[in-house]
């Protein structure tokens, strides 16, 4: 597992689930069923807005896959990759 707070571009479908991710200048296609992330809101004391987050597998054009945890704090305008898994 790698922790990060890197910016990313996340494209979502009509149902609001992620379809593509651009991270570190690499495009990934969402290649599994995205899962909403659960947040322990009792541990978050100073947020004005509840974050939106997803976990999904992304696969690049070369077939390399990673699992991503992505979070947006502003209605999907800016996304951050918070964790990746090999």
Image: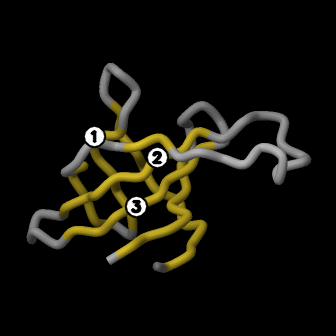
Between circles 3 and 1, the one closer to the viewer is 3
Q: Which residue is mark 1?
A: 19
* Residue at point 66%, 41% (across, down): 51
Splitting the image into 4 quarters, where does residue 24 fall?
Answer: bottom left
Q: x and y percent of residue 81 in the render?
A: 50, 61
The secondary element bearing badge 1 is classed as strand
Q: x and y percent of residue 23 in the render?
A: 38, 63
Above-or-below relation of 62 to 29: below
Tag 2–tag 3 contact (CB < 8 Å):
yes
- The reply, left or right, for residue 5 in relation to residue 30 is right
Q: Which residue is mark 2?
A: 54
Tag 2–tag 1 contact (CB < 8 Å):
no
Q: CA distance from mark 2 to mark 1?
A: 11 Å
Instruction: Identify the mark at residue 68; answer none if there is no mark.
Output: 3
Q: Which quarter shows the C terminus?
A: bottom left
Callout 1: 10 Å neighbours few (<14), some, many (20+)? some
């Amino acid at each position: 597992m790698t922790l990060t707070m890197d910016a990313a571009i996340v494209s979502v479908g009509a149902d609001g689930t992620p379809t593509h991710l651009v991270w570190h200048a690499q495009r990934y296609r969402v290649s599994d069923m995205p899962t909403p992330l659960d947040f322990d809101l009792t541990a978050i004391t100073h947020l004005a807005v509840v974050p939106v987050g997803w976990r999904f597998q992304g696969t690049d054009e070369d077939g390399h896959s990673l699992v991503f945890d992505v979070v947006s704090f502003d209605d999907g305008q800016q996304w951050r990759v918070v964790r990746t898994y090999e």
